[in-house]
Image (cartoon, rainbow, N blue to C red):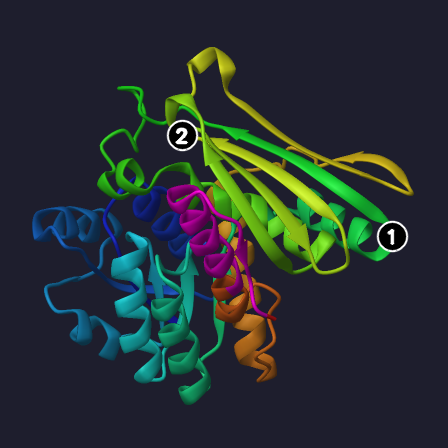
């Protein structure tokens, strides 16, 4: 399958492009980026053409892989899906529910297969944990901590404008929700507040009565970097494994799963754009809750 790569940053080069080049059933058809010099450099590195027009690259491929800020991704995804191209997208799907709905509608209208890349969902130990704990049930609550420190000079994301503007809620919040939702169920109610150092704290109510708390930051002191996910319930206490392998290895699994959807003709992947839209709805509710100091109810 011919993939058009949209994006030229570290994630596009070291995760998307690396995995696509190595995959036996994928062909990198070309690269488009907002910075044409970077697009040309990345295209040269992988021996493919650089495109200066979004629709020209869409025309030249069977599927798109997008590693761009979510507001840019959503527009490209709509154009690609409308053209009948399959979608391999990154999280979050979009920055508004309205834009996420546009992607969902475009994919449904054309019959495009879709996979959204929440890294942990494509790591075998994390996927196994989710399957086992969801099947066991009986969970009363979960506590999640994701403290990253990406604005250090050595970080490839230190100058990321969209991450600086929208913070941990939109960048690493999707990773937390991608595990919480399949285990505890749909979120029905969201409260949120800010803390120092870019911290945001969420209190979530789930459809079957469980609750969860999520604490996130991208700007933790390096000594305070942490990642914890703990479930409590009738079966005791369970902790999410750390995941294993590189992001490119996990992305290769996402490619496999998109190809499986296309081969089978199914459109029910557990992390498709509809799930991506569900995550965006929770994030948008949390944004409203934290900025307006209110509790937000989510519709069914």
Q: Which residues are magenta?
A: 278-299
Q: CA distance from mark 1 to mark 2?
A: 32 Å
Q: Which residue is mark 2?
A: 218
Q: Is residue 149 rendered magenta in the image?
A: no
Determine if residue 164 is in view: yes
Q: In terms of depth relative to the viewer, which is nearer, 88 or 183?
A: 183
Residue plotted at (80% across, 49% down): 133
Residue plotted at (16% across, 75% down): 56
- Among the 4 quarters of the image, the one containing residue 245: top right
Q: In terms of depth relative to the viewer, which is nearer, 33 or 164?
A: 164
Label 1: few (<14), some (14–19) or many (≥20) C-alpha neighbours in 10 Å: few
What secondary structure is marked by label 2?
loop
Task: Indicate whether 218 appears above or below 12.
Answer: above
The percent position of residue 6, horizontal first and vertical second, equals 26, 59
Q: Which residue is mark 1?
A: 136
Task: Indicate whether 242 appears above or below 84.
Answer: above
The percent position of residue 24, horizontal first and vertical second, equals 48, 61
Residue plotted at (78% across, 54% down): 134
Q: In terms of depth relative to the viewer, which is nearer, 126 or 204?
A: 204
What secondary structure is marked by label 1?
helix
**Relative to 165, 284 lies left or right:** right
The percent position of residue 3, horizontal first and vertical second, equals 34, 67
- Of the residues under marks 1 and 2, which one precedes in the sequence? 1
């Amino acid at each position: 399958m011919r993939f058009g790569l949209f994006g030229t940053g570290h994630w596009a080069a070291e995760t998307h492009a690396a995995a696509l080049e190595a995959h036996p059933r994928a062909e990198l058809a070309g690269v488009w980026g907002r910075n044409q010099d970077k697009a040309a450099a990345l295209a040269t590195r992988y021996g493919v053409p650089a495109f200066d027009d979004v629709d020209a690259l869409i025309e030249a491929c069977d599927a798109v892989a997008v590693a761009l800020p979510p507001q840019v991704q959503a527009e490209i995804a709509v154009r690609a899906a409308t053209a009948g191209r399959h979608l391999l997208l990154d999280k979050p799907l979009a920055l508004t529910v309205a834009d996420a709905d546009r992607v969902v509608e475009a994919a449904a209208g054309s019959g495009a297969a879709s996979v959204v890349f929440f890294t942990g969902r494509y790591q075998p130990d994390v996927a196994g944990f989710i399957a086992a704990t969801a099947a066991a049930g009986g969970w009363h609550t979960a506590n999640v901590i994701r403290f990253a420190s990406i604005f250090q000079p050595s970080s490839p994301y230190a100058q990321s404008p969209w991450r600086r503007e929208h913070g941990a809620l939109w960048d690493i919040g999707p990773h937390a929700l991608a595990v919480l939702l399949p285990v505890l169920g749909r979120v029905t109610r969201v409260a949120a507040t800010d803390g120092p150092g870019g911290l945001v704290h969420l209190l979530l109510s789930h459809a079957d009565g469980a609750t969860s708390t999520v604490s996130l930051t991208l700007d933790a002191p390096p000594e305070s970097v942490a990642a914890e996910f703990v479930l409590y319930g009738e079966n005791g206490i369970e902790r999410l494994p750390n995941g294993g392998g590189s992001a490119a290895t996990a992305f290769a699994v996402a490619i496999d799963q998109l190809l499986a959807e296309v081969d089978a003709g199914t459109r029910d992947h557990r992390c498709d754009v509809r799930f991506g839209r569900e995550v965006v709805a929770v994030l948008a509710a949390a944004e409203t809750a934290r900025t307006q100091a209110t509790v937000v109810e989510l519709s069914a």
